[in-house]
Image (tube, rainbow, N blue to C red):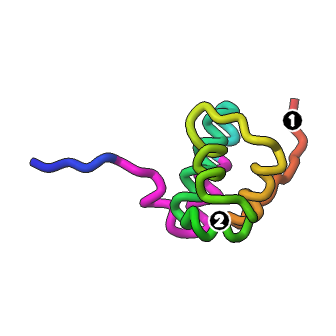
């Protein structure tokens, strides 16, 4: 029996799935998880396309969105815009 490695990027094929995935990670994950999730989304869209839209090189994107990376906020914002996302603040109910 042949198996293949699971890659979440293979399932992020529409805006609704991407938004649901990222919102879930934002609610349940830590900083590292969010950066990794943004990397998965960028990979699903295409790193070349994201690089063109952000003005960053592909190697810089891979490095910034790799496991354990600590990218600058500006980089995260550029990538979020390129993947069609935005940050929205909602009050936390105490």
Q: Nearer the viewer, mark 1 or mark 2?
A: 2
Please check the rendered image and state whether residue 24 is part of the magenta-colored stretch, yes or no: no
- Name the N-terminal-most of marks 1 and 2: 2
Q: Main secondary structure of the magenta part?
A: helix
Residue in view at x 79 percent, y 42 percent: 72
Judging by the rendered image, the residue that carries numbered circle 1 is 93
Residue at position x 54%, y 66% from top?
A: 46
Residue 65 occupies which quadrant of the picture? top right
Residue 3: x and y, percent? 20, 48
Indicate the secondary structure of the residue bearing disc 1: loop
Q: Nearer the viewer, residue 73 or 63?
A: 63
- State the mark number for residue 50: 2
Q: Quadrant of the C terminus?
A: top right
Task: Note whether 31 is above or below 55 in the view shown.
Answer: above
Q: Residues within 10 Å of mark 1 (few under 14, many from 20)?
A: few
> Compared with residue 19, is residue 66 higher up or lower down, i.e. above or below?
above
Judge from the rendering whether residue 80 lies leftward or rightward of residue 12; answer left or right.
right
86 or 79: nearer the eye? 79
| Residue at figure coordinates x 58%, y 41% from the top left | 66
30 versus 35 height, above or below:
above
Residues shaded magenta: 6-23
Residue 39 x %, y %? 59, 50
Snapshot quadrant of residue 25: top right
User: Which mark is on residue 79?
Assistant: none
């Amino acid at each position: 029996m042949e198996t293949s490695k699971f890659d979440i990027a293979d399932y992020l094929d529409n805006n609704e799935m991407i938004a649901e995935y990222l919102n879930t990670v934002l609610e349940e994950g830590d900083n590292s998880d969010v950066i990794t999730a943004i990397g998965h989304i960028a990979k699903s869209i295409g790193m070349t396309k994201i690089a063109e839209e952000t003005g960053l090189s592909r190697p810089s994107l891979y490095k910034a969105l790799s496991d354990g990376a600590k990218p600058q906020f500006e980089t995260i914002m550029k990538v979020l815009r390129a993947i069609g996302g935005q940050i929205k603040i909602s009050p936390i109910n105490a």
